Image (cartoon, coloured by chain):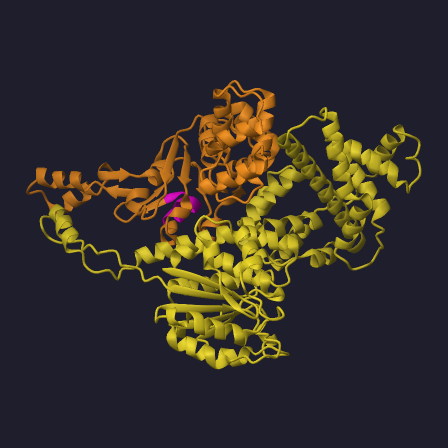
Chain colours: A orange, B yellow
C-alpha cells in the first residue's frame, strides 16, 4: 500500500537471506515474524534477555531496506514532549517579540504552526517522506500510563496535536519495540503487536553468529566457544552470558592467540563472559581444572 | 476447515488460561493468508506471534499446537522402511517387527551421526513397538512415554554414546572436553525424548480426537501450579521463574515508591527552578519521600511436607530483600533456630538450604512439626527484638500433630509487633481438619492467606512490601 523504493520480500526465506547478508543470523521464527510484520503492517514486540540481538534486529532491518533508523530510547519519566512533539517556545517567544503590536488572532495561528513544532522520534517517524524503521527501545522502562502515548501511533499511524489536528502518516514505518521484560506490558499494547520472543540461540546458530561476527576465527574455535557458552548458561547464574558477551569472549580468545580452549583458558578469561564475581567463582569451580 | 480447526485451537488456548482476544484471533487468520501452510514451522510461528504475547504461556501454546496440528498421518513410508533397513544393514536382525536390539543399534548410530531424520523415524518405530498403546484409553500419554523410554534404557543409552564418543576422540580427553561431549549427547537424547513424546501425542490424537487429548494434556499455567503438589520438573521451572518475577515486582515497587508524591517541599530546588520563569515558582519541587521499609521476621516450617513451600517462600522473600529494612529468617520443625546467617548477600541459595537442613537445630524430639513449641522458642529467644515496625510472617500448614498449639503465645507475638501474617499452602477448605489447628492461630493473626501457587505468593509479598496496613490486607489473596 505504500510506494516503497525498498525491497519487498516474497517469502520468509528471502527475509532470512537478506538479514544473513548483513551478518544478522535469524532463526526461522524471527524471519517469519518479520515477514508477517511487513505484510500486515504491524509493529513487532521483541522480548528476551539482554544482549540477544533485539536492538540489532532493528538495525539490520534498517540496513537491508536502506531505510533510516529512528530510535526512541525509553526511560522512566519519558513524556510526550520527548516522545512525540514539543512546541519550540523559545522560537515562539521570539516571534511574538519580533512582531510587537500584531493582531493576536493572526499571531496565534502563526506560532502554532508546523514551523514551531519540534518533532520527536514518533512524530518524525510517521512524517518522514520515505518509510523508516522506528525502533522503540526498552519499552518496559516507561510507566504504564506513558505506554498510552504509543498506542495511537502503533495502531492508527497518526499523531493528534490539539493545536494542529491529526497528523496522519506520510509513509508507514516498520516499527520494532523491544522489551527486557522487567514488567508486564499492557494488554492494549500487546494486542497491537506481533510478539516475538528471542532467547539464547541454539548451539549451531550461536556458532554461526560467532563465525559471521568475529573476524579471523576458525571453525574449531567457534565450535568450542559455542559449546562452552552453552555449558556456562546451564549453570544457575545471576546473569547468564549474552550473545554479545559470547562475541567479546571469542574476540578475547583470538587476541590472546588461543586456538584450543582448555579449562585454564576458560578460567582465566571468564570475566569477559560473566559480570558477577559469584557467577565467575561458581563456574570456575565447576569447570576449573582441579 | 482451517477456520474450524483454528477456532477450536483458540478455544483450547483460552481453556488453558491464555487470554486471546478477538482482535488477535483475526490477526492470526490474516497472518495465515501470508503463510505457507505446508511449512509447519512457519505456520506455528505465525500463530505464536499473533496469539500468544507472554513467554510464560509458550509452553501451554506448544502443547496445544502439538495436539491440534499434529501431523495426522505419521508418513508411513519412512516410518517403516528406514530404521529397520539400516538396522538390517548392520546385521540380519532388523527384519521382524519386535526386534528391540536392532532398533537400539540403529538408534545409537543415528544419535552418533546426529542424523535428525533418522532419529525421528526410529522414535516412531519405538513408540509403535514398545509403548504398547491401547486404543480408547483416556490417558495423557505420560505412561506410554515412560514405558517407551524405559525399554529403550535411555540412561544406559546416554552412557554408551558418551563412552563411544570418548573412545572415538582417542580416549585422552580433559575434563572439559569430556563434559562438552556429555552435554552434546544429553541435548541429543533430550531431542529423542521430544520426538517420542510428539509421536505418542500424534497417535493419541488419531485415536481419540483433538479435544479429548487436549483436555488430558492441558496443564495449569506455571503461576497456577500448586506448589505443594508440583512434580520435580515443575519445581525446577517454578524456580526459574521466581527470579524474573521478583525482579519485576521489585522494579514495580521501586517505581511506585519513587513516584509517590508525599514528600516535603524542597525549598532550595523550587527557588532555583523558579529562576527560569522569572522568579515565579511555577513548579514546586519536592524532596523524595523517605520510604518506610518494613522489617520482616519470617518463620518457616521446614518439616517434610512443608519443605518445598518453605523453600519457595524463602527464595521469594529473599529475592525481595532489598525492599525490606531488615529481614530475619527462622526455620522450625519441632524446635526453632535462626537461619538468617545462611542467606548473606552473595551466598548461593541452594547451598544455604543445604546448610540449613544439616546444620540448623530445628529437630528436638522426633522431627514432626510442633508449632506450639517452636513459637514458644521464638518468643523466649527472639521476642525481645520485635518492635512495632516488625512484620511476622509464618508459613506452614498448622498441622501440629495433636500437640499443644500454645496459640496464646502467638497473641503475645502479635502484641509486640506490627502485624502477624500466616501463609498456609493448603486449600482453605482443609484448614481445621484432622490435626490442623489453623483456626486457633488465625484468631491471633492479622490476616491468614491461602498461598497455593506463585500468583498468590507474589500478590502477598507485594502487599507486604508496599506496607499495606494489616486491616486492608484482610481481604484474602485468592484466585
Q: Is residue B203 above or below residue B158?
A: below
**Total numbered labels placed on residues in the image:** 0
**B201 relative position to A270: left or right:** right
Q: Is residue B359 above or below residue A49?
A: below
Q: Is residue B131 above or below residue B390?
A: above
Q: Identify which residue, B405 or A112, lies in the foreground.
A: B405
**A3 relative position to A77: left or right:** right
Q: Position of residue A61 (x, y in %)?
A: 47, 30
Q: Position of residue A270 (x, y in %)?
A: 49, 33
Quadrant where the C terminus of chain A sits is top right
Taking the view exactly as shown, the residue that stands out farthest to the left is A101
- Residue that appears at 90% across and 40% down: B99
Q: Position of residue B462 (x, y in %)?
A: 43, 62
- Residue that appears at 56% across and 42% down: A235
Q: Is residue B365 above or below residue A68?
A: below
Q: Position of residue B435 (x, y in %)?
A: 62, 78
| Highlighted magenta segment, given as a residue range | A149-158
- Residue that appears at 51% across and 33% down: A243
**A189 relative position to B69: left or right:** left
Residue B454 appears in the rendering: no
Write down the quadrant of residue B154 in the picture.
top right
Membership of B185 in magenta stretch: no
- Mainly helix, strand or loop, the magenta region? helix
Amino acid at each position: 500500500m505504500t510506494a516503497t523504493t525498498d525491497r519487498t520480500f516474497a517469502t520468509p526465506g528471502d527475509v532470512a537471506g537478506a538479514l544473513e547478508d548483513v551478518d544478522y543470523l535469524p532463526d526461522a521464527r524471527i524471519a517469519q515474524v518479520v515477514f508477517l510484520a511487513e505484510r500486515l503492517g504491524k509493529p513487532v514486540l521483541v522480548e528476551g534477555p539482554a544482549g540477544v540481538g533485539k536492538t540489532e534486529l532493528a538495525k539490520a532491518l534498517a540496513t537491508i531496506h536502506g531505510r533510516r533508523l529512528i530510535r526512541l530510547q525509553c526511560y522512566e519519566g519519558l513524556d510526550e514532549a520527548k516522545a512525540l512533539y514539543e512546541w519550540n517556545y523559545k522560537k515562539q517567544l521570539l516571534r511574538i517579540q519580533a512582531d510587537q503590536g500584531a493582531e493576536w488572532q493572526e499571531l496565534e495561528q502563526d506560532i502554532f504552526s508546523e514551523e514551531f513544532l519540534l518533532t520527536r522520534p514518533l512524530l518524525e517517524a510517521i512524517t518522514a517522506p520515505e518509510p523508516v524503521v522506528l525502533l522503540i527501545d526498552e519499552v518496559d522502562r516507561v510507566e504504564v500510563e506513558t505506554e498510552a502515548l504509543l498506542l495511537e501511533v502503533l495502531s492508527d499511524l497518526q499523531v493528534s496535536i490539539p493545536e494542529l489536528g491529526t497528523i496522519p502518516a506520510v509513509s508507514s514505518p516498520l516499527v520494532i519495540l523491544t522489551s527486557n521484560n522487567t514488567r508486564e506490558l499492557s494488554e492494549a499494547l500487546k494486542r497491537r503487536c506481533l510478539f516475538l520472543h528471542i532467547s539464547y540461540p541454539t548451539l549451531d546458530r550461536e556458532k554461526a553468529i560467532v563465525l559471521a561476527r568475529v573476524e579471523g576465527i576458525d571453525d574449531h574455535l567457534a565450535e568450542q566457544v559455542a559449546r562452552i557458552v552453552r555449558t556456562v548458561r546451564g549453570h544457575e547464574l545471576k546473569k547468564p552470558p549474552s550473545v554479545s558477551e559470547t562475541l567479546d569472549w571469542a574476540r578475547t580468545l583470538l587476541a590472546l592467540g588461543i586456538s584450543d580452549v582448555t579449562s585454564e583458558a576458560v578460567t582465566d578469561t571468564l570475566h569477559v563472559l560473566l559480570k558477577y564475581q559469584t557467577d565467575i567463582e561458581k563456574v570456575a569451580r565447576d569447570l576449573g581444572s582441579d | 476447515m482451517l477456520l474450524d480447526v483454528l477456532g477450536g485451537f483458540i478455544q483450547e488456548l483460552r481453556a488453558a488460561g491464555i487470554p486471546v482476544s478477538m482482535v488477535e484471533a483475526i490477526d492470526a487468520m490474516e497472518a495465515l493468508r501470508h503463510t505457507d501452510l505446508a511449512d509447519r514451522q512457519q505456520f506455528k510461528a505465525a500463530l505464536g506471534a499473533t496469539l500468544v504475547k507472554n513467554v510464560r504461556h509458550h509452553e501451554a501454546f506448544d502443547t496445544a499446537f502439538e495436539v491440534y496440528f499434529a501431523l495426522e498421518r505419521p508418513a508411513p513410508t519412512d516410518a517403516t522402511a528406514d530404521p529397520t533397513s539400516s538396522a538390517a544393514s548392520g546385521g540380519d536382525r532388523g527384519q521382524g517387527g519386535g526386534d528391540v536390539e536392532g532398533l537400539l543399534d540403529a538408534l545409537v548410530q543415528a544419535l552418533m551421526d546426529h542424523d535428525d531424520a533418522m532419529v525421528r523415524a526410529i522414535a516412531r518405530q519405538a513408540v509403535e513397538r514398545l509403548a504398547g498403546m491401547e486404543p480408547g484409553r483416556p490417558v495423557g500419554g505420560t505412561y506410554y512415554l515412560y514405558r517407551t523410554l524405559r525399554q529403550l534404557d535411555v540412561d544406559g543409552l546416554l552412557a554408551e554414546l558418551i563412552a563411544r564418543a570418548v573412545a572415538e576422540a582417542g580416549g585422552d580427553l580433559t575434563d572439559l572436553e569430556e563434559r562438552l561431549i556429555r552435554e552434546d549427547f544429553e541435548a541429543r537424547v533430550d531431542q529423542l525424548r521430544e520426538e517420542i513424546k510428539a509421536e505418542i501425542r500424534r497417535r493419541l490424537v488419531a485415536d481419540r480426537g483433538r479435544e479429548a487429548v487436549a483436555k488430558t494434556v492441558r496443564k495449569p499455567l506455571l503461576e497456577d501450579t500448586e506448589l505443594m503438589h508440583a512434580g520435580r520438573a515443575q519445581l525446577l521451572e517454578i524456580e526459574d521463574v521466581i527470579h524474573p518475577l521478583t525482579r519485576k515486582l521489585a522494579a514495580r515497587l521501586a517505581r511506585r515508591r519513587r513516584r509517590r508524591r508525599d514528600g516535603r517541599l524542597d525549598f532550595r530546588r523550587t527557588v532555583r527552578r523558579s529562576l527560569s520563569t522569572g522568579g515565579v515558582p511555577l513548579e514546586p519541587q519536592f524532596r523524595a519521600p523517605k520510604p518506610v521499609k518494613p522489617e520482616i521476621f519470617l518463620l518457616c516450617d521446614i518439616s517434610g511436607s512443608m519443605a518445598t513451600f518453605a523453600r519457595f517462600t524463602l527464595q521469594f522473600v529473599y529475592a525481595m530483600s532489598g525492599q525490606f529494612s531488615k529481614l530475619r529468617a527462622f526455620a522450625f520443625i519441632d524446635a526453632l533456630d535462626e537461619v538468617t546467617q545462611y542467606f548473606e548477600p552473595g551466598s548461593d541459595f541452594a547451598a544455604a538450604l543445604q546448610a540449613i537442613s544439616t546444620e540448623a537445630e530445628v529437630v528436638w524430639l522426633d522431627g514432626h512439626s510442633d508449632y506450639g513449641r517452636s513459637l514458644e522458642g521464638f518468643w523466649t529467644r527472639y521476642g525481645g527484638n520485635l518492635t512495632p515496625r516488625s512484620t511476622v510472617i509464618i508459613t506452614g500448614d498448622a498441622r501440629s500433630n495433636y500437640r499443644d498449639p500454645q496459640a496464646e503465645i502467638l497473641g503475645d507475638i502479635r502484641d509486640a509487633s506490627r502485624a502477624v501474617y500466616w501463609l498456609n499452602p493448603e486449600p482453605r477448605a482443609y484448614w481445621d481438619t484432622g490435626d490442623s489447628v489453623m483456626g486457633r492461630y488465625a484468631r491471633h493473626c492479622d490476616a491468614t492467606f491461602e498461598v497455593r501457587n506463585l500468583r498468590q505468593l507474589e500478590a502477598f509479598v507485594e502487599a507486604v512490601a508496599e506496607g499495606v496496613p494489616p486491616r486492608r490486607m484482610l481481604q484474602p489473596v485468592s484466585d
